[in-house]
Image (cartoon, coloured by chain):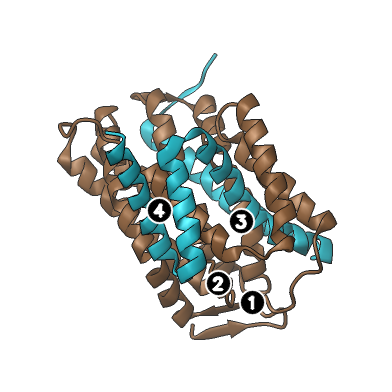
């Protein structure tokens, strides 16, 4: 019923499938005429994927995750330095977790 | 290659590769402990050293690699493995589509090199709203790939006796990086509608669906909102 494979074949399958996902969007878009509408889709989708990852995780992640998100956004708005904002977010989460014991 | 440009304006420069690697370096530092955690977890799951190292080097997608450890044994069930890998990594189709704006018109060997090392984390690390240089995507990808493989090797060498392998911080690191990227990429009203729709859709989908489908659904919903209700594309980018 269920086909099993040796570990090296399994790794190869994972690598090929993941490579496929990495190339698929690019290849499909290359063969699709880049209309203004599709360009707006691509502009919006890159941020939207990150939003779709962050929003549910922040909602369900508790005060530490929420502090990380808010601190990273605030520091990015002030400093425009992504690395500084990222570290600030992590430190905010560490502080909240330390305070919570 | 010093510089390759075409009429559509995509560029790939050596300086861009270096800039991307520099921008991704702080993120790469956080990726190393995550790689260590994967190496240790893989060892605990009974994955041999060379197999786990080959997996990190060739798959280079942490979430899916952690996800398949549960089903790992000497004989791995192929269909569940393939479906799980596809489901966890399907969001990369969207990142790959977005990356098209960086690589359009460039030679295919350049495009596929960029694609092979593409990740949402790497894309976020090098997207600063400035000039799109495909070299930066490649440089960022190289930096994160190196950190991921290095971390995995360290974790495998450490073996199974360092206790709970998952550092609690990585989810927070990714959240903080993506939040910073979004704050940097905020374009006011142009972002509000697609991102608002993406957030709402993803939150609702996360309640109803397992795994990471909510990321894809939210991303597509936000993209469609931008496509049909967004302003004209910016000529500068």
B217 relative to B68, above or below: below
- The residue beneath circle 2 is B134
A40 relative to B55, above or below: below
Q: Earlier in the sequence, mark 1 or mark 2?
A: 1
Q: Are marks 3 and 4 on the same chain?
A: no
Q: Which chain does tag 2 point to? A: B
In the displayed structure image, the side of residue B147 where residue A29 appears, left or right: right
Say which chain is cyan.
A
Mark 1–mark 2 Cα distance, whole angstroms, equals: 7 Å
Mark 3–mark 2 Cα distance, whole angstroms, equals: 12 Å
- The residue beneath circle 3 is B96
Q: Which chain does tag 4 point to? A: A
Of labels 2 and 4, the one closer to you: 4
Badge 3 vs badge 2, beta-carbon distance below 8 Å: no
Residue depicted at x 25% and y 29%: B44
Badge 3 vs badge 1, beta-carbon distance below 8 Å: no
Q: Are marks 3 and 2 on the same chain?
A: yes
Q: Earlier in the sequence, mark 3 or mark 2?
A: 3
Q: Quadrant of the C terminus of chain B?
A: bottom right
Q: Earlier in the sequence, mark 3 or mark 1?
A: 1
> SS at mark 1?
loop
Badge 1 vs badge 2, beta-carbon distance below 8 Å: yes
Q: Residues within 10 Å of mark 3 (few under 14, many from 20)?
A: many
Q: Position of residue B146 (x, y in %)?
A: 33, 59
Colour in which chain B is drawn:
brown
Mark 3–mark 4 Cα distance, whole angstroms, equals: 27 Å
Residue B10: give its label.
1
- The residue beneath circle 4 is A89
Residue depicted at x 50% and y 57%: A73
> SS at mark 4?
helix
Q: Which chain does tag 1 point to? A: B
Q: Answer yes or no: is residue A35 visible.
A: no
């Amino acid at each position: 019923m269920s086909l099993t494979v040796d570990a090296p074949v399994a790794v190869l399958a994972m690598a090929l499938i993941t490579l496929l996902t990495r190339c698929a969007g690019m290849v499909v878009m290359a063969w699709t005429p880049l209309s203004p509408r599709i360009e707006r889709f691509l502009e919006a989708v890159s941020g939207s994927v990150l939003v779709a990852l962050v929003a549910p995780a922040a909602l369900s992640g508790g005060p530490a995750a929420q502090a990380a998100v808010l601190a990273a956004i605030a520091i990015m708005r002030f400093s425009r330095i992504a690395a500084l904002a990222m570290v600030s977010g992590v430190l905010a989460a560490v502080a909240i977790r330390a305070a919570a014991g | 290659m010093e510089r390759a440009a075409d009429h559509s304006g995509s560029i790939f420069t050596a300086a861009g590769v270096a800039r991307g690697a520099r921008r991704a370096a702080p993120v790469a530092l956080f990726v190393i402990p995550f790689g260590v955690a994967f190496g240790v977890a893989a060892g605990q799951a009974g994955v041999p050293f060379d197999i786990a190292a080959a997996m990190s080097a060739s798959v280079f997608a942490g979430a899916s690699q952690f996800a398949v450890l549960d089903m790992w044994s000497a004989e791995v069930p192929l269909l569940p493995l393939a479906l799980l890998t596809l489901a966890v990594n399907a969001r990369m189709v969207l990142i790959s589509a977005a990356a098209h704006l960086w690589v359009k018109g460039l030679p295919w060997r350049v495009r596929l090199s960029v694609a092979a090392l593409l990740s949402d984390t790497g894309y976020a690390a090098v997207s600063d709203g400035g000039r799109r240089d495909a070299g930066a995507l490649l440089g960022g990808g190289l930096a994160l790939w190196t950190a991921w493989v290095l971390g995995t090797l360290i974790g495998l060498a450490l073996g199974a006796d360092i206790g709970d392998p998952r550092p609690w911080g990585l989810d927070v690191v990714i959240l903080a990086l993506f939040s910073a990227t979004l704050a940097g990429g905020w374009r006011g009203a142009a972002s509000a509608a697609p991102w608002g729709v993406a957030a709402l859709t993803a939150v609702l989908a996360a309640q109803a669906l397992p795994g990471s489908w909510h990321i894809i659904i939210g991303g597509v919903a936000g993209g469609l909102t931008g496509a049909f209700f967004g302003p004209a594309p910016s000529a500068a980018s």
